[in-house]
């Protein structure tokens, strides 16, 4: 028996496989490959349900509730995939072959309750999603700025403010 016989015959086992999932990469073909090979374990699905449930509860509480999520874990534990795919599922403009990304993520779940919760939260509570890798952002600036400073800058950048504002706000 050859090792390659253990793999899916429909996939080229000699293709390039990215070692790390990056937020900035959203080319449709690469995103299609990523999500089609995303394995949602029982534990991962449980974490999606837990997070979505908490997001729903916070938004239903009314008032000026805003939801921020901090995801931490060891290198290779799936943080980037988890957060990237959740964030993309909240963006109606992200599509693969004309199908909204949320449906591709839902197809990876086994439980109908998780699928329904994702659909409910994403539709009932429109979100502005800002994804960043703090370590990369801090290193790119060749400095170890405080987390709040990096977040503030990224929000300004996301909102379309000029780079001049960044210089004025953060130069020491």
Image (spheres, rainbow, N blue to C red):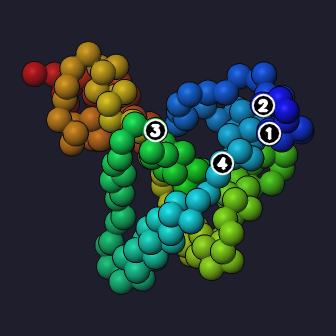
Mark 2 residue element:
helix
Q: Is 9 left, or right, of 110 in this rendering? A: right
Q: Position of residue 141 (x, y in %)?
A: 29, 19
User: Which of the two residues, 165 or 104, is positioned nearer the viewer here?
Assistant: 104
- Residue 60 location, quadrant: bottom left
- Examine the rendered structure and indicate whether residue 35 appears above or below residue 117: above
Q: CA distance from mark 2 to mark 3?
A: 24 Å
Q: Earlier in the sequence, mark 1 or mark 4?
A: 1
Q: Residue at x 89, y 39 (%)?
A: 10
Residue located beneath label 2 in the image: 3
Which residue does the image show at 34% across and 19% down from the upper left? 140
Q: Are marks 3 and 4 in contact (CB under 8 Å)?
A: no
Mark 2 and mark 3 lie on one chain; the one further toward the N terminus is 2
Q: Which residue is mark 1?
A: 6
Q: Quadrant of the N terminus?
A: top right
Q: Mark 2 or 4 closer to N-term?
A: 2
Q: Marks 4 and 1: in contact by CB < 8 Å?
A: no
In this view, 26 is above or below 17: below
Under tag 4, what secondary structure?
A: loop
Sequence-earlier tag: 3 or 1: 1
Identify residue for label 4.
38
């Amino acid at each position: 028996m050859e090792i390659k016989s253990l793999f899916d015959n429909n996939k080229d086992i000699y293709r390039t496989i990215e070692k790390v999932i990056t937020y900035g990469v959203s080319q449709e073909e690469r995103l299609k490959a990523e999500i089609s090979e995303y394995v949602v374990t029982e534990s991962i699905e449980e974490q999606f349900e837990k997070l979505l449930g908490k997001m729903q509860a916070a938004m239903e509480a009314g008032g000026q509730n805003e939801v921020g999520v901090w995801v931490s874990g060891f290198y290779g534990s799936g943080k980037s995939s988890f957060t990237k795919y959740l964030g993309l599922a909240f963006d109606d403009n992200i599509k693969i072959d004309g199908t909204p990304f949320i449906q591709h993520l839902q197809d990876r779940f086994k439980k109908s309750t998780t699928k329904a919760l994702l659909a409910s939260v994403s539709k009932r509570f429109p979100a502005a999603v800002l994804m960043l890798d703090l370590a990369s952002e801090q290193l790119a600036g060749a400095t170890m700025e405080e987390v709040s400073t990096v977040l503030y800058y990224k929000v300004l950048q996301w909102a379309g403010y000029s780079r001049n504002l960044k210089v004025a706000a953060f130069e020491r």
